[in-house]
Image: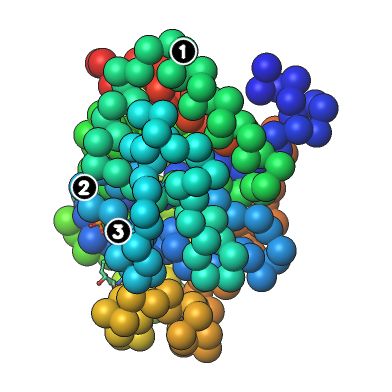
Amino acid sequence: MENQNIAAGLSAVRTIAITSGKGGVGKTNIATNIAIVMRKYKKKILLVDLDLGLANVDILLGIHPEYTLQDAIEGRKEIKEIIVEGPEGIKIVPASSGIEGLANLNESQKEQLYKSFSGLDEEVDIMIVDTGAGISSDVLNFVLASNEILLITTPEPTAITDAYAMIKVLSRKRKNATIKLFVNHSDSKEEADSTVKKIALVSQRFLDVKLEYVGYMLHDQNVSIATRMQKPFTTVYPSTKATSCLNKLAATLLKNNDASQSLGVGDYFRRITHSSILNE
Ligand SMILES: Nc1ncnc2c1ncn2[C@@H]1O[C@H](COP(=O)(O)OP(=O)(O)OP(=O)(O)O)[C@@H](O)[C@H]1O
Ligand SMILES: [Mg+2]
């Protein structure tokens, strides 16, 4: 079904799940800002907040969504009613803490959810999914349902260890997985490069995984200032060093577009509702 759609030129939606081993490494900032930066390439973006803990995307953007994904899951609202418009015209699906309910939907509710999300395919080129940190079953489910995985780490030893733990679990669940690696909070390019080398050395020796180094973001005080202002740093500080780094990330991601990796929005939600990972 998915392949037929791709062959017919339908549902060509790239899905990129953003995750990390350790918490607080910058996932939500990167997810939100990469979504905004990609708009400059005229891409239609859907940013889906699947962090079960806190609805971070809306806090980061200072927006107050009236409804959440939970309203759609429970059939009270249509998908189009829960979507809010963010900066630069990105579309946002706000998180809800009760989303674990996805696993308990009956078949007709799942089908309904699939159908309504599939209706978004025409309006979306790239779907960016912000997940929580760590190797809980729900995070793994949201990550593995995506065709592309962007793993964020920092140069800190604890973040590196946790990134490795995440790579290990993902590589066991998905054979020949390709994981895109991005280093945040780096002091220099050299520090980012050496962080990636450390991770690649152990991963490639012990795990069946392909790591793709897609870039780094320098530690930049303007990111935390923008966070406190509840504004995206790429918008308030368009020439700051973190923004330059994210511009490069967007260019790298958009350059390597493998159309066979595409997935419909509905297909992504079908995968997370049918996942057996949640029950493992
Ligand atoms: N490159 C950077 N330079 C300076 N501060 C940064 C940078 N990246 C992120 N931060 C700051 O780090 C904090 C955590 O960022 P963020 O909320 O995006 O992380 P997260 O990985 O989504 O966290 P969680 O695991 O809790 O979801 C924020 O206060 C943010 O401003
Ligand atoms: Mg977050």
Determine if the C-beta at disc 3 is less than 8 A from ligand 2.
yes
Q: CA distance from mark 1 to mark 3?
A: 30 Å
Write the residue at 49% across / 26% down.
113
**Residue at 67%, 47% in the rendered image:** 123
- Residue 42 percent location from the top left of the image: 71, 63
Where disc 1 sits, the SS reads helix
Q: Is 280 above or below relative to 35?
A: above
Q: What's the residue type where badge 1 is placed?
A: Ser
Residue sitting at the far front:
76
Q: To which residue does mark 1 refer?
A: 108
Q: Which residue is mark 3?
A: 56
Is residue 205 at least partly visible in the picture? no
Label 2, label 1: how far apart the Cα atoms are: 27 Å
Instruction: Answer with mark 2 or mark 1, whichever residue precedes in sequence.
Output: 2
* Between 172 and 132, the one nearer to me in the picture: 132
Image-based side of 215 in relation to 68, left or right: right
Q: Quadrant of the N terminus?
A: top right
N-terminal label among 1 and 3:
3
Quadrant of the rendered image holding ligand 1: bottom left
* Residue 149 x/y as whole percent: 47, 43
2 vs 1, front mark: 1
From the image, tell me which residue sits under label 2. Answer: 53
In the image, is 185 to the left or to the right of 258?
A: left
